[in-house]
Amino acid sequence: MGAELYEQMKQSVIDGEVELAEELAQKGLDEGLPAVDILDLGYVKGIEEVGDLFGRGEFFLPELVQGAEAMKAAVAVLQPALDAAGAKRSSAGIAVAGTVAGDIHEIGKTIVCSMLSAAGFTVTDVGCDVPVETFIAKCKELSPDLLLLSALLTTTMPNQQKTIEALKAAGLRETTKVMIGGAPTTRAWADEIGADGYAEDAIEAVSVAKGLVGAS
Amino acid sequence: MTLAETDRQRVHDAALWVLEHVGCAVLDPEAAALLAAHGAAVDGQRVRFGEELVARALQTAPAGYTVAGRRPELDLRVGPGAPAVLGAASGPALVLDGGAQRHGTLADLRTAIALAHLSPNIDVHGFSVEPTDVPEDRRAAVGAHAHLVGSDKGFRPNVSTLAELQVATDVCEIVYGAAWHERPRLWTIINSTSPLQVSADAAQVLMRLARLGQPICFAVCAMGGTTAPLTPAGLLVVQHAELLCGLVLTQLARPGCPFLYGGTSSVSSMQTGALMMGAPEYWALMGATVQLGHSMGLPVRAGGSVTDAHVPDAQAGIESALGLKTVLDLDVDFVLHAAGILSSFNCYSPVKFTIDDALIGALRVARAGIIVDDESLALDVTAAVGPGGSALGQPHTRRHARDALRGTLMNRAPFQTWLTLGGHDVAETAAARVDEALRAYTPPDDLDSVTRRQLDEYCLG
């Protein structure tokens, strides 16, 4: 019985069916399946397949993003049970991502978040126009492996640097790798402001992120 | 025409529906309050309004306007009957240096200013590359100084923040006097943030410029598949709705203020998310943008010599030429990025500028058409040459021999000759031209000494 349900869960992520993914998660819990198994044998298999299909060029961005959304919706249903079981979700790494203060350009950062989720990262998207203090507070709360800072304007790029400096001042720099991105940014800018990683697009961002956290 | 008349109307009606039912987020409270005071329904930052506000705005927005130049002969007309005003590349942070991209410097900006100044085709320029070696809080002033000292052509300052706007208006006062704003004077671009958002800074800058009677070029760059529907019709609806929102805000801030309807939206790659400025859909979208703006009696900014290529190669040439030709053929009123832009708006290249400059010259010749009069019909020549003769010996041929000295950047030599001369492709030839042009460049000296000193003190002091 479980095997068939796990297969449906996997397929709901591949198909990007958010509501179905939620329903199946609830059904699994109702039938007494362990939350950790539901996650690992159902949804994680689905998102891995989505990632593979994207990597092979068979899936395009909408399929990847919608797969990640379905996965996220299912995890939200499972979370109380996962917490109750004291289960720590296996994750490629914990990431916090946002667009820096003064900048309301979101789409690139959102795509990176979806890609990282699909690659197995646990991602918290703190949105756009994010003050330095919010980034620091989130880092204190979540102790992420990675902090990703997006800027789409030459006038807001300096806020990437300010966030990194604030991270140092808060004593979090040693434990948090920082990646930056956005159209006007470059590898040279990343080096200049002491970021650990830079990627030109969301696809490269995943491999850089994996490299920084030591995931395969 | 890209859109059939019924389809154009349908896109327009759909945008009105979006404005009324979905609304736009106007993130500045003063702007939202202004819209509310005139009947818009405001719910937090979300502003919704019906056709009436749009119709009223269209009654007061002019079909054309003249932007005052530094001297009367440098005035530029925008609107029906006037040739398209052409602007150089605008705003990228990166420059192509050899085969590599790097952040732009003040020296790069000065090169761009010199090339724009020397161009017979470019009317307006401004921050063709960002001088990122100048501290961010000094960049607007130092950049303005470089433009105003380096060229007398139309200058487009950055006005993405209120601090930048202050610099722009201050330097106008220094150069043109306290009454500078009695005429349209400033070339600016104010961007919406798709989908359906006007940032607080953009709204404030728009209202302040409008109150000074300065033309508002409101520019939308929605990205199909990411910040708007992927299908071009739906993408156009989002672009059009945002533009109508900008139009209404402008006309409420100051009825009769010039408004330039501007769009550079295109579709995104669904494999990488990247905006595609060289895609054929872009050319069609730009054609439709010109149609939509003109159908409402507004001047239009659209298109450009834009490309997704990273170097000035064949892809860059094809995409730039077709993108530019599309809008020029539809009598667009203003084209930004008419020369020098690469990498989907992200990178400036002096070599690309030089090639695009030649492209514009060639398109102008082609668009001028064929003059038909006694001199050009030259029946006496044909009669004198007769069957089997040669026109080369005719005085008429000698008289017109230099008419066609155009596009000299392009190779016209036979293969062996071309090879003997070094076998250069057009990018290599253009690179050599850049060096020649910079050696020949001298800045204008039309600013009087008092103005120049004030400008030096304000911008560099």
Image (tube, helix red, strand yellow):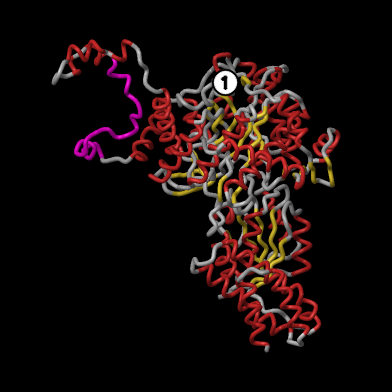
- Name the residue at the bottom extreme: A1
Q: Main secondary structure of the magenta part?
A: loop
- Pointer 1 residue: B76
Q: Residue at x 62, y 76 (%)?
A: A11
Quick check: B52 above or below A196? above
What type is the residue that disc 1 sits on? Leu
How many numbered discs, if any? 1
Q: Position of residue B43 (x, y in %)?
A: 84, 46
Name the image quarter holding residue B359. Answer: top left
Q: Residues within 10 Å of mark 1 (few under 14, many from 20)?
A: many
Q: Is residue B353 left or right of residue B30?
A: left
Q: Give the quadrant of the C terminus of chain B.
A: top right
Q: Is residue B407 left or right of residue A9?
A: left
Q: Residue at x 27, y 18 (%)?
A: B401
Name the image quarter holding residue B163. Answer: top right
Q: Is residue B392 left or right of residue A174?
A: left
Is residue B439 in sight in this rendering? no
Q: Position of residue B417 (x, y in %)?
A: 20, 36
Is residue B47 in sight in this rendering? yes
On whether residue B322 falls in the magenta region, the answer is no
Quick check: A212 above or below B277? below
Pick the residue in front: B376 or B174. B376
Where are the magenta residues, as a range? B400-422
Callout 1: SS: strand
Quick check: B427 above or below B173? below
On whether residue B416 falls in the magenta region, the answer is yes
Q: Position of residue A60 (x, y in %)?
A: 55, 63
Pick the residue in front: B221 or A215. B221
